[in-house]
Amino acid sequence: MPSAAAPFCLALFQPDIPQNAGTMLRLCACLGLDAALIEPAGFPISDKHFRRAGLDYLDHVDIARHASWRAFEDWRATTGRRLVLLSTGGTTPYVDFAFRPGDIIMVGRESAGAPPETHEAADAVLRIPIRADLRSLNVAVAAAMVLGEALRQTDGFAKGELS
């Protein structure tokens, strides 16, 4: 279960590339953030590529696993936290959004993005402006950019054990 002390939670919706998932969980560990993993994942959680990308950092991140989108939404309803979705279809640039501590920042599947029900449930759908002739950034890079901005806006880098 995510901790009350973490400023943000990164939710991975049905990740399908273990190396990206491991990288994002390592990012959470290093920045003192919680994570939520919405299953099914496209790989076994014990997958060697997942463990290799996360290294021993996976032991330093609080990961809430949810068996389905519905289970995640039921959990989120009990927490009262905003859901902020990153999507190439978003209308608000992430730098124009006012993040609040406690926000859940969600990324979609690498192969298919986030389905319509996640867009409908989101309190905000953000995008990272990129060149019009290109499709998208790597999901781990996108998560790092947006989490960095969220922490900057909320002075999250100045808190806790970050140095």
Image (tube, rainbow, N blue to C red):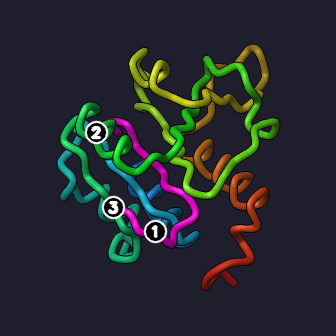
Relative to 163, residue 55 above or below: above
Foreground residue, 136 or 76?
76
> Does 126 sit left or right of 39 as displayed?
right
Q: Which mark is residue 74?
A: 2
Q: Which residues are magenta?
A: 1-15
Position in image of residue 138 (x %, y %) = 56, 38
Which badge, 1 or 2, is on the more N-terminal residue? Answer: 1
* Mark 1 vs 2: CB contact within 8 A: no
Structural distance between the alpha carbons of marks 1 and 3: 13 Å
The reply to whether residue 61 is in sight is: yes
Which residue is denoted by mark 1 in the rendering? 4
Position in image of residue 22 (x %, y %) = 39, 57
Position in image of residue 43 (x %, y %) = 22, 43
- Which residue lies most toward the right here? 96
Screen quadrant of the C terminus: bottom right
Residue drawn where x is 62% and y is 58% of the image:
101
Asked if residue 74 lies in the magenta stretch, the reply is: no
Q: Which mark is residue 63?
A: 3
Structural distance between the alpha carbons of marks 2 and 3: 16 Å
